[in-house]
Structures are given as C-alpha cells and as structure tokens.
Image (spheres, rainbow, N blue to C red):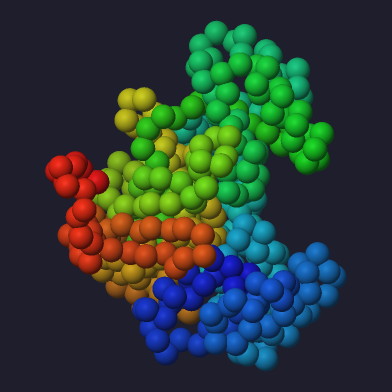
Amino acid sequence: MCAGTGAANNLVRSLRAGDGSLRIVGCHSDQFFLKKSSADRNYLLPSARHPKFGDALRGLVERERVGVVIPTTDDDVALVSGLRKTLRSRVFLPHPDTIALCQDKYALAQALGSAGVPVPATWAIGDRGDVSALFRTDGTPPRLWCRARRGTGSVAALPVTTAAQLLAWVSYWEDMRGLPSTEFMISEYLPGRDFACQTLWQNGRPVLAKTSERLSYFGGRGTPSGTSSIGGLHKMVRAPAVVEASLAAVRAIDAHATGAFSVDLKENDEGCPLVTEINVGRFLTGTSIFDLTGKHNMSLTYVRLALGEPVSISEIYDVVEDYYMVRDLDALPDIFHAASLGEGIEDARGDLAETRV
C-alpha cells in the first residue's frame, strides 16, 4: 500500500532482492505517487476516507489473488487492521488493541513503564496550565522533549528548557495547525545514541531482530529539533542491550505479538537505551539496511511467515556490523561496508589526508 512512496519502493526492492519470483501489486489513492511505483502492477484506489475504499481494496485483492496485504504507514496499518476480517488475503498484523496502544506514544510509555521496561520519564499535557506546573515540579530535568502523541516523522518535536518555550510551541501548533494541547506529550530529554531495532514476531515468539544506529538525520538541519525519525546515515551495529529492551517492550504489550514491531530507542546520559516508541505493524521506511545485510532478509521473512511457510532461524538476533546506509532526497538508499568506503575515491586533501572521515 502507498505504492510509489519511498517506504513502499524500498520494500519492493527488498522483496525482489530476496525472491525475484514474487509478484508485487501496488496501490495508492494518489495517482502521482502511483506513477513512481516500482511494483509489477499498480492500482489507483479511492481515498481511505471514502466509504467505497474497503470495497475497492477487497476487489483488488480478489482480482489479483493477493496472498498478503502489507501496509507501509501507520494509517494503513490501522486501516488494514480494521478490514482484516473481510479481506480475502492474509494480513500479518498485531491485535487491534496493540496497534491502538502503540500509535499513542504517551499511552505506550505509560504501559511500558508500568511493566518495568526502560522508558524516559513522560508526562501528558492536559491543558496549557499543566505546562507551567510541570516546570515547577522538583526533579524535572533542565531540558525536556516535546512532541505529538501520534504521528510519524518526529511531528511537532522540539527540545525545550522553559515553560515559555513549550507554551509558545504548543500554542502555535494549536492555533495554526489545529493540534490541541491534549495531543502533546513531554518526556525526559535523551542525549545519547539513537537506535532502531526492527523485529518480527509470530504468536508471541520473536523470530528475527536486527539493530542499526542513526548517525545523522535526513532534513535534521531544517527542523527545530535538529533531528528526524528518518536517518540520513545509518550504521548496522551490535547492540545486545538494545535488542533486550526491544524484545521486553513487545512482550510487555502483547503476549501473542504477531507481525513487525520496529522499536526506536535512545540512550540517556548514562548510556542506557530507553524505548521511545514502537512503529507497529510495519517496517521502517529505511528497511533496506535490515533486508539487504546479514543472513536473513527481514521483508522476505515477513512474507513467508504471513503465508504460513516454514521459517527456520536458529539465532533470533542477526548481528550485522559496519554496514552503512546513506539516504538523501531523490536518491536510492545506498548500502556499503566500511571496508569499501574508499573504493572509487581519490584523496585530494593533501596534508589533511590523515584526518579521519
């Protein structure tokens, strides 16, 4: 779904790399995006808000004999989840309650914290009056992280140090973008390394996990936060503590977890990785680095699990190190190993040649 977007085309690339015989069908309600789709066949659907959307998707599934429907956005995850009982295809998604919980970042933080999973200290904003009271509370960190409870792409995210900054930011979004103050949350600011742990589950059993670190952010320089959920430079890393926290987080919210759970974590000032959110039911937009490195292609494994095919993976954590992925506007994500970094590059730095890249 959402064919033609970066996330969907990355997924298509991964699936073809894993099994070239797969027949991939794409769909989107935007004809311009659909024109960019790399799927084998593409269909224009009505808007998801249109009352006939469900019928159109069901018709497409039947016409093309679709084996499994794979959503690529949070909205599509919720949409397909609601239609799962009427689609004549397989879906490989968590329980609807799990999806709803993960798509509310504040509710998720509360649930994980109550279960003993490491998460940043988090507060909800009931109204604007709650903000000043929060900064007067003893023990409140000097810097806090403000963001929307729902959405992707670090929407409305901003580090703040005063109540005035926070009030101005929330007021702006409320007045100019129609996002009420009750849709904001505040959490402990985490200054450390930024990780992604993409995992696959089947009936409460973890099947596969991989970890990467975001070293820079796509478009980060143009945002007030200086960051983004979309990395500009990723690196595959060995991070057992990240995997441990991620698996604990998924187990805490769903004893029968099924499908993809892509966990974001960031280190606090003590170097402990804390869970900041779970992208539920879908892969990260940069799934290429998890699929095209290591022993197992995660996207292909997802499809095989969804179709009920046997999958035998002895080591859940597929450790991959020193592979990098570079992403930029209008460019296909490129993946390379550290050992090949200098290939095809001539060093013209002269006396600066010993400077580390």
Residue nearer the viewer, 311 or 330: 330
Expressed as whole percent of the image width and height from the top left, the position of residue 240 reads 27, 45
Residue nearer the viewer, 259 or 3: 3
Reply above or below: 260 against 171.
below
Specify the quadrant of the image occupied by residue 336: bottom left
Horizontal relation, residue 143 to residue 36: left or right: left
Reply above or below: 86 against 314.
below
Expressed as whole percent of the image width and height from the top left, the position of residue 318 reads 27, 60
Specify the quadrant of the image occupied by residue 83: bottom right
Q: Is residue 254 visible?
A: no
Expressed as whole percent of the image width and height from the top left, the position of residue 153 reads 58, 49
Q: Residue at x 30, y 72 (%)?
A: 312
Residue nearer the viewer, 214 or 55: 214
Q: Residue at x 36, y 52 (%)?
A: 234
Q: Residue at x 78, y 41 (%)?
A: 177
Q: Given the current orientation, which residue lies at the most extreme right position?
A: 51
Q: Is residue 324 visible?
A: yes
Classify the position of the N terminus by image quarter: bottom right
How many discs appear? Answer: 0
Q: Residue at x 78, y 69 (%)?
A: 47
Horizontal relation, residue 82 to residue 216: left or right: right
Expressed as whole percent of the image width and height from the top left, the position of residue 18 reads 36, 78
